[in-house]
Image: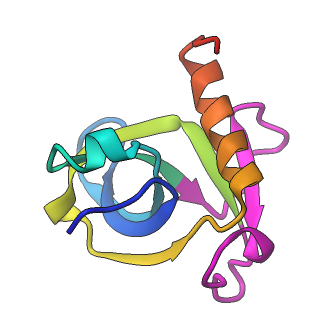
């Protein structure tokens, strides 16, 4: 399956120490050039844990997605520093999509700041 930038998916997200993984949501941030020419996709992690004003996180809620998150997970946080390249066959399923263009642009800008990329 070809995923699109902004798709919210479930996948086994590896722990940073590489000892195991946990199924959790993530957002596809790779663009169509990557997604249409490779089996790999680039994903950032979503979490329900409030990062306490972490400048590397972006809050999203049900007003930003096409299919609402189920309570009690109405608010999620995009950890823009938790970036993963994964083969798309490891994605369990698509659960929603970032529907608000401005929110997706905010996420991409925050990722650029993590890597010190200026546009």
Residue 38: x %, y % from top left:
16, 44
Q: Residue at x 76, y 54 (%)?
A: 59
Residue 118: x %, y % from top left:
64, 11
Image position of 66 (left or right of 33): right
Specify whether residue 21 is painted magenta. Answer: no
Q: Residue at x 60, y 84 (%)?
A: 67
- Please identify the quarter of the rendering in which residue 4 is found: bottom left
Residue 9: x %, y % from top left:
41, 68
Quarter of the C terminus within the rendering: top right
In terms of depth relative to the viewer, which is nearer, 25 or 109? 109
**In this figure, what is the number of numbered marks?**
0
Quarter of the N terminus within the rendering: bottom left
Majority SS type along the magenta span:
loop
- Please identify the quarter of the rendering in which residue 63 is found: bottom right
Specify whether residue 73 is painted magenta. Answer: yes
**Magenta range:** 46-75
Residue 55: x %, y % from top left:
77, 31
Most extreme residue toward the bottom, as rendered?
A: 71
Q: Is residue 83 visible?
A: yes
Q: Identify the coloring.
A: rainbow
Image position of 24 (left or right of 22): right
Q: Is residue 42 visible?
A: no
Image position of 37 (left or right of 29): left
Q: Residue at x 52, y 76 (%)?
A: 96
Q: Residue at x 70, y 88 (%)?
A: 71
């Amino acid at each position: 399956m070809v995923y699109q930038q902004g798709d919210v998916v479930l996948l086994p997200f590896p722990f940073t120490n590489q000892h195991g993984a946990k199924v959790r949501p993530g957002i596809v941030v790779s663009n169509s050039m990557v997604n249409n020419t490779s089996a790999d996709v680039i994903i950032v992690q979503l979490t329900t844990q409030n990062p306490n004003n972490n400048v590397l996180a972006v809050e999203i809620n049900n007003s930003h997605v096409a299919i609402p998150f189920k309570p009690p997970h109405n608010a999620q946080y995009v950890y823009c520093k938790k970036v993963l390249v994964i083969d798309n066959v490891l994605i369990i399923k698509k659960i929603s999509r970032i529907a608000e263009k401005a929110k997706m642009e905010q996420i991409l800008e925050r990722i650029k700041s993590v890597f010190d990329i200026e546009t």
